[in-house]
Structures are given as C-alpha cells and as structure tokens.
Amino acid sequence: MDDDELISVLPIHYSNSLSPNLHIHQFPLLSRPLQTPPAAAVSGKRIRARIKPITRRLEIHVPVDPRPEVWNGERSKSLGAARQEDDREKNQDVGKMKQMEGEEPRLIEVRMRSELIPQEGAYMLGVVRNGQLHLQPINETHQFRPTLTYLDVMSRKSRRSRGDAGSDEDSDEGPPPDPDEPPPVQTAAKKEKKPLEVKEVQVSARKVADDKGNLQGGLSAVRREMLLAIRAEEEEDWQDLDFCDGETVEGQEAFEAVFSQNEEHLECKSDITAFLKGIKGL
C-alpha cells in the first residue's frame, strides 16, 4: 500500500541445526504449556510419548487430573475396560500402562494422536530475538487430537445389549394369550407345502477389469490402499520417545538450538537486473 511505512529492518539468520529426530510441539491450550496436572505429578505420573517411525504416527499420553471434583473414578473403570479391549483389537502394546494382577482397568490418561498435514512448499519457524529474525525449516507438521476410539467399543456393547433385550419387546405377535379364555378357532387350514424341486444349475464366474486394469465389483483402489495403510500401522510397533517440556534442561537446549550462532555476514553480488533476467517468461 502507498500509505504503508517501513517500521524496521531485521537481519535474517537461517539455521538447520535441529536434530531430525527432534519433534517440537505447539498446543493451543490457552497459551499454557502442556504439563502434567499437579495432582497426577504427586503420584509420579508423567507425560509420555511414542512414535511409529514408518507410518509417521505420534502419540502423547497426558495423565488425567485424579481429583474427585474434576474426575469420575467410577466412570473411569468402564472407560478403562473399553480402552483395554480397543487396544487388544488393534494389537496395541500398552507397555507401562498394563494393569496389575487383580486390579480393575481404569482410564488414567488422555491419548493424543497425530495426523500428518500435507505441506505444499517449504515451511519455516520464525522467532525474533534481539532484533534478529531466526528461521528454522520445518520438515513435517502434525495435528494432535484426542483418541476416543474406546467409545466405539462401548457403543457396540450398548447396541448389542439393547438388541438382545429388545428382541422380545419389539415382537409383533402382541401380548401373550389369557389362560382363562378358550383358544381361538382356526378358520382356515394350513396350506400344504409343495415338495421342493431339485434342479441342477451350472454357474461360472470370471473377473472383469476396466481399461485401467482395476477389478470391477470388488474394492476400489483407494479403499484398498486405505485398508492396507491401516493394517500396516496397526502391525508396526511403537517406539518410546522422551517428552521434555519447556522447563526441562533438554527443552531449553532445544529452544536455544533454534537460534543461529553464525555471525558471518553475507554479501549480495547480484543486482536487480540479473535477478529479473533469471525469471523465465520475462
């Protein structure tokens, strides 16, 4: 805009010093860092993380706040049993979360699972410090959401229980007959069943493919790829990660690694004419 004015000029520092195995997370939790609830930290619980490196799936496990005023302990038993069954169906190794012998399963953590967000072009993390803009390339972007698949297990159980209990209630035969009343007289005789005729039928089946070689009448290529990806993810083993919040020494070291320590000044040896000539189509 013509009325915009230049406020300041910031020198730019580019750095690629972060480890490729380092994952930096930002959570929009009212500008507060992701930390263990104090009531859970007293009992020794900590935030844990794990990854499936091949399928690029991340999980962060945050202990729940066990205070009675904010958490229903009885409800956590049914939820914990549903999560245990859900883990068993998906072949998930719960590891340290396995219950002791004779102890009822409980829901004692919130699991947040990542979804890989496709990136179009290059993304940078920019931080202004001491009047300088420090840029750090971002290789992958993940969005975390709470996993509530154990609620599907509870929903299936609820539907099955309602179906078993409602089979008699939904019957259209009406109320049972009164034992004091005489049985109703059958006005029409039952029709005699005709004997079944046996015939020999020959059937042949063949696979029909379209122009692209895809089989018709079966799974589509997209659905087949989705099922294979889900199966590959479920069969891959989890690998534990160290979760370090901003207050730890490791977190501070990772934060300082974002800022470039190189003070070398770069000098531009080209002019605007050479830049424009390098653009194709001009």
Image (cartoon, helix red, strand yellow):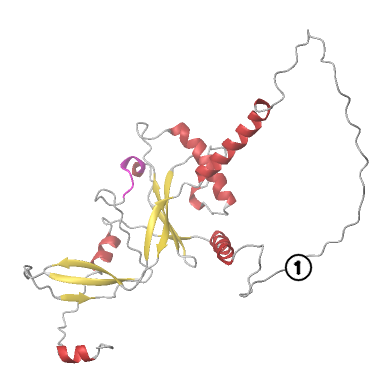
The answer to which quarter of the image holds residue 43 is: top left
Q: Nearer the viewer, residue 122 or 191?
A: 191
- The reply to whether the magenta stretch includes residue 37 is yes
Disc 1: which residue: 206
- Please name the residue shown 21% across and 74% down the image: 260
Residue 251 sits above or below residue 212 on the image? above
Q: Nearer the viewer, residue 151 or 89?
A: 151
Residue 251 shown in magenta: no
Q: How many marks?
A: 1
In this rendering, would 181 be left or right of 196? left
Residue 63 is situated, as x and y percent measured from the top left of the image, at 39, 45
Amino acid carrying mark 1 in the image: Arg
For this rendering, which residue is in front, 97 or 274? 274
Span highlighted in magenta in the image: 35-40
Residue at (51%, 36%) from the top-left corner?
Answer: 78
Residue lying at 67% horizontally and 71% vertically, measured from the top left: 209
Residue 60 location, quadrant: bottom left
Q: Secondary structure at mark 1?
A: loop
